[in-house]
Amino acid sequence: MQNQLAKPQHCILLKNGIQIWIDDQKLPIVDAILGDKTKDFILIEGERIGRYEISGIFSPQGMESITRKNNGEWQCHKGTWHEKGHQCSCKPQKTVTAHVEGIGEIEYKSDK
């Protein structure tokens, strides 16, 4: 069992780049607030936000991808991040099917 140092969070990303991080427990509350179409401004974590200024609500992994892309990095077919202008030297993988006696067919990934 792992000890968590912080509560799981999500980021409310605004179109101007401002990030408002909230605990996952508050996601249903934020969803309910956003579902009320009668309000143009909503109050989240002490900030009054125009509902149409929200780009989205993202996980930490999603925010990492956004940040990396904004910094010019790109992700190859293997899921490895590379700096802008650098070529990928990751080996492509192919799926191999093998017959194992007593078990049957199995599939695994192999470097080409």
Image (cartoon, rainbow, N blue to C red):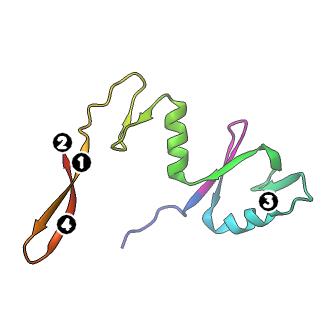
Please give the residue where the numbered disc 1 appears in the rendered image: 94
Callouts 1 and 3 close, C-beta under 8 Å: no
Foreground disc of the pair 1, 3: 1
What range is drawn magenta here? 10-20
Please give the residue where the numbered disc 3 appears in the rendered image: 34
For image coordinates 26% across by 40% down, the residue present is 92
Q: Earlier in the sequence, mark 2 or mark 4?
A: 4
Return the x and y of residue 79 as percentages of the image width and height: 37, 44
The kind of secondary structure element at disc 3 is helix
Foreground disc of the pair 3, 2: 2
Q: CA distance from mark 4 to mark 1?
A: 14 Å
Q: Kindly identify the amino acid type of the residue bearing the numbered disc 3.
A: Leu
Q: Is residue 43 above or below residue 26?
A: above
Q: Earlier in the sequence, mark 3 or mark 2?
A: 3
Q: How many numbered discs sit on the rendered protein? A: 4
Please give the residue where the numbered disc 2 appears in the rendered image: 112
- Most distant residue in the right direction: 38
Q: Kindly identify the amino acid type of the residue bearing the numbered disc 4.
A: Ile
- Badge 3 crowding class, 10 Å Cα cut-off, few under 14, some 14 to 19, many 20 or more, is some
**Foreground residue among 22 and 75:** 75
Q: Is residue 2 left or right of residue 20?
A: left
Q: CA distance from mark 1 to mark 2?
A: 6 Å
Q: Kindly identify the amino acid type of the residue bearing the numbered disc 1.
A: Lys
Callouts 4 and 1 close, C-beta under 8 Å: no
- Badge 4 crowding class, 10 Å Cα cut-off, few under 14, some 14 to 19, many 20 or more, is few
The kind of secondary structure element at disc 4 is strand
Q: Is residue 70 left or right of residue 40?
A: left
Please give the residue where the numbered disc 4 appears in the rendered image: 106
**Foreground residue among 32 and 102:** 102
The answer to whether one can see residue 3 in this image is yes
